[in-house]
């Protein structure tokens, strides 16, 4: 009957107790069985699959044959020892088979003595031992960007106020109290042990909120006090939309030895129906409207129903009920009333409707026949092998044998009580954790910003101080260069005067040479070669010419005055700058004190041309030199008499500026084609 149900799944409980109806019905989930194994080891629950835990060993097994069906014998059963094995537990022959005649809700075993307390706050310590009564999760959206959370809180107010009026106690109804409840404040009822708590987290205008209604009920008839806890969560995606979750659970006072209150009847919390019926809210799951439920399937809507069943993104189960000859095997409206938004209920009222839908489902082995019920699991993958085994089928014969009410109970426990692994129910502790994390992040950001500001101020002050030191250093270097230049100029003047007036070694060879040049000059000003000889005679330790340089003076077109000024600046300005070392910007310093320009090298393209660079090679006193640097006039017209190009090299052994070409412009990459 149940396709895909494994024999080992029968009789297992969601949270470890074999007395639970879920275990008797064989619908225990894998996650529940894992919790059962874990809690069984801790001794917090009873037997799991025939193995005694500490609780059952200490207080006796309520399932033993001698006490089963007798509540008083259950409480007086003798302790079991570790060496005594449990009697074998008879398995139900069928998942829907009737049970032995023992009470549906038997008395629980007493807990450890240390856990016995009558303070209602003690309930919070045993959250795992609560019984899940109902859960639901769906999306809500308010129109026109209105506050969806406030509308949920207003429906919660309506629900709580109605409960209070029926039970005879009072709860504040004013908007201020419930606005504070939305903001994270609590509400205390008058006349009953009822309290509302909440917590709010706001991130960039988006609300994450959780509220909790705690009701402590003591009937005063000797039964254990019972606590009901309703937890409502809202995980916002914007101001107008978010996900609403609801978890309703109850638990009897831990450690109480005595009878329990009767088990509650299956129902849906009225809060869920109030939110679904609110015309100002759109309620969906995976984009499917949950207000349109149950849905009738006919021949015209069979294709749409198949698309809903086969949708791989569907996150809500679908229960299909097909009418038989005697009508529906399970009333679709009662089934919807038991499941609520946890499932979509589809019903086919006749054979024609069922045939139209089965024609689409049969190729995948997922059809449902007359008088039967099928549960289509979430996120189906029709192309996956054995996919049909995921979608449980309850035949018409099984439903007739075990009854409609039992099938409804099974589906409610499986779909409206189990919290599946893909569902994340929002709780107050989750919101508090978000607030702690947000506070921590803000605190770290504030500290980081504060220390960054302080560090930035220190960095700016240090940078300003460093800039002041750099300015002082530049001023000192400039002053040093200026003084050094003045020193060299004074020294050169002294040497010039000594050379001219014969104060160095009598008449001096320089003075005689200059006199000879002037006596041999036929015109004033002298020729280019005579100007060069005079300058060399005046500054013999600073300037000299190579053989190629002397020969270039024969055809030098530069007028004597311009040539004299250029060679003189080379001796009195440029040579002292070279002698000052690398700390001086030679080009900038020379051009600031001379009307001529200075280039220390040729362009990149000229240097790549080996032929052009070969024209700049020369020899001085047997040493190879490269006459790449050159002094040039302001005019660039070679036909102008004031045009001058003096190519030179600094000879390190002698310390002189050696001229290798004077007057014309040597070919470079730009002028090669024109020349």
Image (tube, grey):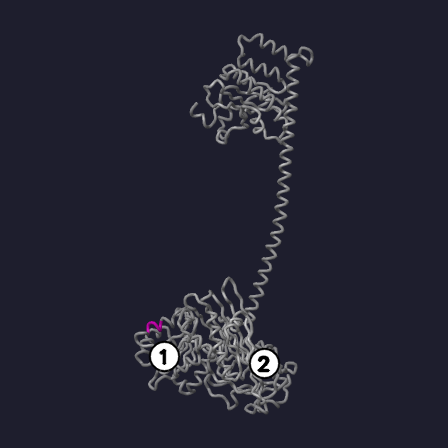
Q: Which of 246 and 201 is in front in this view?
A: 201
Residue underneath mark 2: 45
- Return the x and y of residue 630 as percentages of the image width and height: 54, 24
Classify 24 as above or below 576. Answer: below
Q: Which of 444 and 619 is in front in this view?
A: 444
Question: On the picture, is 622 further left or further right than 235?
Answer: right
- Return the x and y of residue 438 as percentages of the image width and height: 56, 63
Q: Residues within 10 Å of mark 2 (few under 14, many from 20)?
A: many
Q: In which quarter of the image is the C terminus?
A: top left
Q: Residues within 10 Å of mark 1 (few under 14, many from 20)?
A: many
The magenta stretch is 302-306
Query: Could you say whether the residue bearing mark 2 is in a helix, strand or loop?
Result: loop
The verdict on residue 314 being magenta is no
The verdict on residue 304 being magenta is yes
Q: Earlier in the sequence, mark 2 or mark 1?
A: 2
Whether residue 261 is visible: yes
Asked where in the image residue 355 lies, by quadrant, the reply is bottom left
Classify 250 as above or below 303. Answer: below
Classify 200 as above or below 662. Answer: below
Whether residue 7 is visible: no
The answer to the question of whether label 2 and label 1 lie on touching residues, with beta carbons closer than 8 A, is no
Which residue is drawn at the image coordinates 45% and 25% (left, top)?
671
Q: Give the residue furthest to the right.
A: 505
Asked where in the image residue 110 lies, by quadrant, the reply is bottom right
Residue underneath mark 1: 347
Classify 146 as above or below 468. Answer: below
- Return the x and y of residue 564 as percentages of the image width and height: 55, 17
């Amino acid at each position: 009957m149940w396709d895909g149900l494994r024999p080992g799944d029968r009789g297992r409980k969601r949270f470890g107790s074999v007395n639970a109806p879920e275990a008797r019905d064989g619908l225990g989930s894998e996650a529940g069985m894992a919790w059962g194994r874990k809690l069984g080891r801790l001794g917090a629950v009873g037997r799991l699959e025939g193995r005694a835990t500490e609780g059952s060993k200490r207080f006796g097994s309520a399932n033993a044959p001698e006490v089963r069906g007798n509540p008083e014998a259950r409480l007086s059963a003798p302790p079991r020892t570790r060496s005594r094995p449990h009697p074998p537990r008879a398995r139900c022959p069928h998942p829907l088979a009737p049970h032995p005649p023992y009470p549906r809700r038997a008395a629980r075993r007493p807990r450890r003595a240390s856990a016995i307390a009558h303070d209602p706050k003690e309930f919070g310590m045993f959250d795992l031992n609560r019984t899940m009564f109902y859960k639901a999760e769906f999306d809500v959206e308010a129109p026109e960007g209105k506050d969806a959370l406030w509308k949920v809180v207003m429906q919660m107010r309506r629900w709580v106020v109605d409960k209070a009026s029926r039970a005879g106690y009072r709860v504040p109804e004013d908007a201020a109290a419930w606005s504070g409840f939305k903001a994270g404040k609590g509400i205390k009822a008058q006349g009953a042990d009822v309290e509302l708590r909440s917590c709010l987290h706001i991130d960039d205008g988006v609300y994450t909120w959780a509220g909790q209604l705690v009701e402590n009920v003591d009937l005063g008839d000797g039964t254990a006090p019972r606590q009901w806890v309703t937890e409502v969560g809202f995980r916002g995606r914007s101001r107008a939309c978010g996900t609403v979750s609801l978890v309703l659970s109850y638990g009897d006072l831990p450690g109480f030895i005595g009878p329990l209150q009767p088990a509650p009847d299956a129902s849906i919390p009225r809060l869920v129906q109030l939110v679904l019926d609110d015309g100002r809210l759109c309620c969906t799951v995976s984009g499917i409207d949950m207000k349109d439920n149950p849905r009738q399937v006919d021949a015209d809507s069979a294709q749409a129903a198949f698309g809903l069943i086969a949708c791989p993104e569907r996150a809500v189960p679908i229960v299909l009920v097909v009418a038989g000859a005697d009508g529906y095997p399970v009333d679709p409206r009662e089934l919807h009333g038991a499941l609520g938004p946890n499932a979509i209920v589809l019903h086919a009222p006749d054979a024609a409707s069922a045939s139209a839908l089965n024609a689409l489902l049969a190729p995948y082995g997922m059809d449902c026949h007359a008088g039967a019920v099928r549960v289509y699991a979430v996120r189906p993958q029709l192309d996956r092998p054995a996919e049909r085994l995921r979608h449980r089928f309850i035949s018409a014969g099984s439903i007739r044998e075990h009854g409609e009410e039992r099938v409804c109970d099974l589906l409610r426990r499986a779909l409206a009580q189990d919290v599946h692994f893909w569902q994340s129910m929002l709780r107050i502790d989750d919101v508090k954790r978000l607030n702690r994390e947000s506070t921590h992040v803000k605190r770290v950001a504030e500290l980081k910003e504060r220390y960054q500001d302080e560090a930035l101020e220190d960095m700016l002050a240090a940078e300003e101080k460093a800039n002041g030191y750099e300015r002082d250093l530049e001023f000192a270097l400039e002053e040093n260069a200026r003084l050094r230049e003045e020193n060299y100029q004074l020294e050169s003047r002294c040497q010039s005067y000594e050379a001219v007036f014969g104060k160095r070694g009598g008449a001096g060879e320089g003075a005689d040479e200059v006199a000879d040049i002037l006596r041999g000059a036929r015109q004033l000003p002298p020729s280019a070669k005579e100007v060069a000889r005079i300058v060399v005679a005046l500054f013999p330790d600073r300037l000299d010419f190579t053989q190629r340089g002397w020969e270039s003076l024969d055809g030098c077109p530069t007028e004597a005055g311009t040539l004299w000024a250029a060679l003189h600046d080379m001796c009195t300005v440029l040579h002292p700058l070279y002698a000052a070392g690398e700390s001086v910007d030679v080009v900038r310093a020379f051009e600031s004190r001379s009307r001529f320009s200075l280039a220390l090298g040729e362009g990149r393209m000229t240097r790549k041309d080996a032929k052009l660079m070969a024209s700049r090679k020369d020899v001085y006193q047997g040493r190879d030199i490269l006459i790449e640097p050159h002094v040039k006039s302001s005019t660039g017209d070679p036909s102008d008499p004031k045009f001058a190009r003096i190519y030179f090299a600094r000879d390190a052994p002698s310390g002189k500026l050696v001229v290798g070409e004077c007057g014309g412009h040597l070919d470079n990459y730009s002028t090669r084609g024109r020349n």
